[in-house]
Amino acid sequence: MVETLKDLLNCLQSDPSSSLIVNPIYMASSLIGEDPKTSHFKLVREKDKGQDTDNPHILAKRHIESCAPTDVNVVNKILSLSSAPITKEELDILTSCKKIEVKLPLKITNKSILEQFGWTVENPYPGDGDPKLAGIYVFLNMVTGERYVGSSVDLLARIRRYFNSSVLSNEKRLISKSFLEYGIENFSLEICAIDPLLFGEGFDLRAGDLCLALEQHFILTNNPTLNTVKVAGSPPGGPMPESTKLSIRKSNGRPVFVFNHDKTVLLFVAESANSFMKEFNLCRQTFFKYLASEKALFGLFIFSNDILPGVTTKLMDSSELLNALIEGKSAMFPDMKSNQKISVMLIDIESKKEFNFDSLRSASKFTKTFDSNKLRYIGMDKLTKMNSGDSYKGWILNR
């Protein structure tokens, strides 16, 4: 009997034509485990029946309805599943941070906002242009009085995203719907940026937790009605398409089987959806779309969580499947340049050491982990624009 993925692979490799008896307990147990996203939506939708609970969404709503003062213990308890606790002194600093009003649409830089706050702050991300501001932002609908609060370690980048056409057109989000209905000109924007100097060394490592704490305090104190979810950092609690929920639930912890275009040949087996997407650099949305529809990606490969009876087994290794995916993508999109199959060398200017990679993405990831402060990191946007021989942040690129 096949009880584990290892047993399955051994069976397939030793005797591809053998009949497989899969342990039903193994398959059933994989359905019990939940993807974090699925678990989140369950928490958001749990009904408050007066029960004892640690559900942060219920606790947040109860606190808002009670009109009780919001102290650090309340903030920490509600954020206990997603953020490190902060101290009373830190919350006092956060809630006393200076606020400024900014005109919409944004036509300013982080540097100009720093000047409005009267700060002289060293850029916490050297070499990446303007300083990044951490804190909260509040949109106010000046017609209805409704507010929306959010937080980010890069405030202006986050705020500008709200005015992308793809975000504005998402009417499932109350803030986007309000923008479309009343017009951006009828909104004001307030920014509360956290001064790194008030928190000393290591601020960049704690900035995310501090931002969430300040956002949570604002939610509990002001109950912004355009925030449908009352726990800071949580994604909107709107409905997820049934096909997507099913494919995520089915694939969690279960092997992924890759078949040819007509499901007659088994080509590859992966331990899980996450490991498969990571190994082959597949977009999560694309993968689950094809898993749910059982259509062939690039007209070549069908993904499934189930082993099919009577198929021929011709297992490919990872490199063979990767090459086939790249070729399939190139054939379907001939004008699209692939950055996956490129021989890349990075030379450390200081040490003269050479590092070889089989893709630009791998090279970019390497620079991100090269030092703990990420001072040598080269993003994909920059790397793809560099020519052979160009130097940047202490690296020389050779293709």
Image: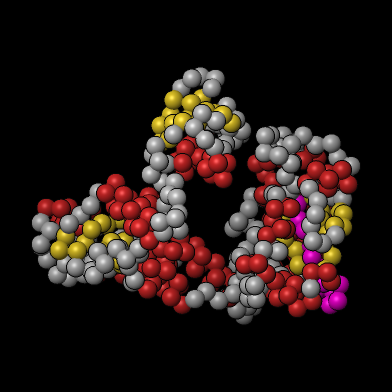
Residue 17 is left or right of residue 242, and the answer is left
Residue at 37 percent across and 50 percent down: it is 279
Dominant secondary structure, magenta: strand
Q: Position of residue 153 (x, y in %)?
A: 69, 49
Residue at 83 percent across and 45 percent down: it is 112
Q: Position of residue 306 (x, y in %)?
A: 27, 68
Magenta-span inclusion, residue 324 = no
The image shows residue 180, relative to residue 283, as above or below, that is below
Residue 382 in view here:
yes
Question: Which residues are drawn in magenta?
Answer: 135-147
Magenta-span inclusion, residue 145 = yes
* Residue farthest toward the front in the current orientation of the protein: 335
Q: Nearer the viewer, residue 378 or 292?
A: 378
Q: Nearer the viewer, residue 34 or 239?
A: 239
Q: Quadrant of residue 172?
A: bottom right
Residue 253 is left or right of residue 262, and the answer is right
Residue at 34 percent across and 71 percent down: it is 295
Residue 213 is left or right of residue 399, and the answer is right
Q: Quadrant of residue 69?
A: bottom right
What is the quadrant of the N terminus in the image?
Answer: bottom left
Number of numbered discs present?
A: 0
Residue 143 is left or right of residue 202, and the answer is right
What is the quadrant of the C terminus in the image?
Answer: top left
